[in-house]
Amino acid sequence: MKRYRFVTPHRTGKWYSDLQTAQRHACEIGAGFLDGMTGKFVAYVETMLEVGNADDVTGPKDQALAA
């Protein structure tokens, strides 16, 4: 199972089990916001999305994706 979090140059978000939840909480660390009109996530500059494997107990082998 995958898990998701957003990372900015100064803060790291918590891991969430689905992308939609991670996007909803991204504003807490200043990573982006959900557009109220379109419902789309807008990431701020230099925000990265990390995708990890929840089954890895030693820490995820993160795959960073530019948002």
Image: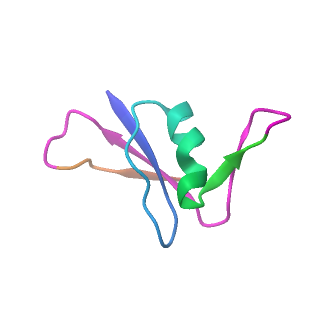
User: Which residue reaches farthest front?
Assistant: 28
Q: Is residue 44 above or below residue 36?
A: below
Q: Quadrant of the N terminus?
A: top left
The answer to which quarter of the image holds residue 47 is bottom right
Front position in the image: 41 or 51: 41
Q: Is residue 18 above or below residue 60?
A: above
User: Which residue reaches farthest bottom?
Assistant: 10
Magenta stretch in the rendered image: 36-58
Residue 40 seen in the figure: yes
Front position in the image: 18 or 51: 18
What is the magenta segment's predominant secondary structure? loop
User: Which residue reaches farthest left?
Assistant: 58
Residue found at x 20% / y 33%: 55
Residue 67 seen in the figure: no
User: Which residue reaches farthest right?
Assistant: 37
Q: What's the coloring here?
A: rainbow
Is residue 7 shown left or right of residue 56?
Answer: right
Is residue 33 shown left or right of residue 22?
Answer: right
Is residue 6 shown left or right of residue 58?
Answer: right
Front position in the image: 22 or 63: 22
Residue 51, magenta (yes or no)? yes
Question: Where residue 3 sits: x, y (%)?
Answer: 37, 36
Question: Where residue 35 sits: x, y (%)?
Answer: 78, 41
Q: Is residue 24 above or below residue 67?
A: above
Question: Where residue 48 sits: x, y (%)?
Answer: 53, 57
Question: Where residue 50 sits: x, y (%)?
Answer: 43, 50
Residue found at x 50% / y 72%: 9
Residue 48, magenta (yes or no)? yes
